[in-house]
Image (cartoon, helix red, strand yellow):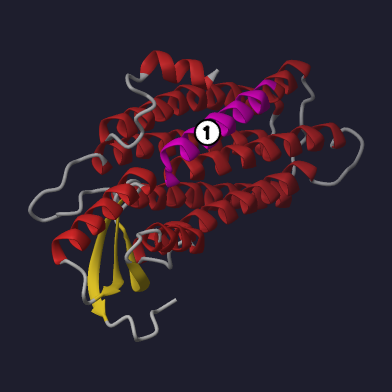
Amino acid sequence: MIRLIIRQCIRNYRDTADPAVREAYGLLSGVLGIACNLVLFLAKLAAGLFMGSIAVISDAFNNLSDLGSSLVAIFGAKLSSRPPDEDHPHGHGRFEYVASLAVSFIIFGAGLQLLRAAVEKIITPQAIVFSMPALAVLLVSMIIKLWMYSYNRYIGKTINSGVNRAVARDSLNDVFATGAVIAGTMLSRYVDWPVDGLLGLAISLLIIYTGFGIARDSVNLLLGCSPDPQLVEEIRAFVLKGKNILGVHDLVVHDYGPGRVTASIHAEVSDDLDIVDIHAEIDAIEQQIKNQLGIDMVIHLDPVSESKSPSP
């Protein structure tokens, strides 16, 4: 279904290297998330109030925090697509990482609030009213959240978006949380334990853990982490394919946001080659890397005597 929606709503949807197309993907995922989470929040809140279940109400407010995450995703898509300027010559792509961090704070804050409510429910448990319509609402919400996980995962992979990957993980957690609420509601009819409060506690801890994991990944990207070893090997392989390249060394990769990666490398060439010919070959390699890997590459020539052993 998401592929059909994308084709209908996004022009040139295949050109994901275009900042305008990436922004359109982000806006689409954010609008879909707001619509779905608003419906789920209202439906679950009504069901939770009718049943008197803190677990269901906690699940509802978790969806409300997800709505806030979708709003952050929209702002992140808009800001990260801004072109380079005098103060930011490499563009604003890292706004997407900042947006992911903001999403993690929203998730973490919601988890803390739900943790407090769950502890109060364990201390002073209340009876849960069993309701088939309310349980049906929860089952439908699981189906919707599975679809949200699917489309956010697809968009995250298509445009390499950390925000969408974070939202996808959170949506999958919601599926497990709602499933636990349903199981607990059924179990509470047969046992005297404060099942509702215990499940609310488990859900809140799951939400907090998810927020922490997303924050950790976002901070690593903002601080700058080691490049993917596979990407390193691909860059080296592209450069070493040059017929006059004897060796390479000192590869450096800078990540300024999805689709905004730059890199530099030193390429060893024979010192008796024609400088014009080898410069043309280097230009061709840089353009090939740009076309195939989407990386702005700078290759520095190191003239060496072929009698010396080249770098690996």
* Horizontal and vertical percent position of residue 237: 44, 60
Residue at x-position 32% and y-position 19%: 11
Can the viewer see residue 65? no
Nearest to the observer: residue 67 or residue 265: 265
> Measuring 42% from the left and 34% from the top, which residue is drawn there?
70
Q: Nearer the viewer, residue 290 or 311?
A: 311
**Quick check: is 254 in the magenta stretch?**
no
Residue behind mark 1? 154
Q: Is residue 304 visible?
A: yes
Q: What element does badge 1 sit on?
A: helix
Q: Position of residue 88 (x, y in %)?
A: 15, 54
- Give the image location of residue 246, x and y in percent: 36, 72
Q: In this rendering, would 100 be left or right of 139?
A: left
The residue at 27%/80% (across/down) is: 304
Please tell me whether residue 187 is drawn above or below residue 268 in the rendered image.
above
Q: Residues within 10 Å of mark 1 (few under 14, many from 20)?
A: some
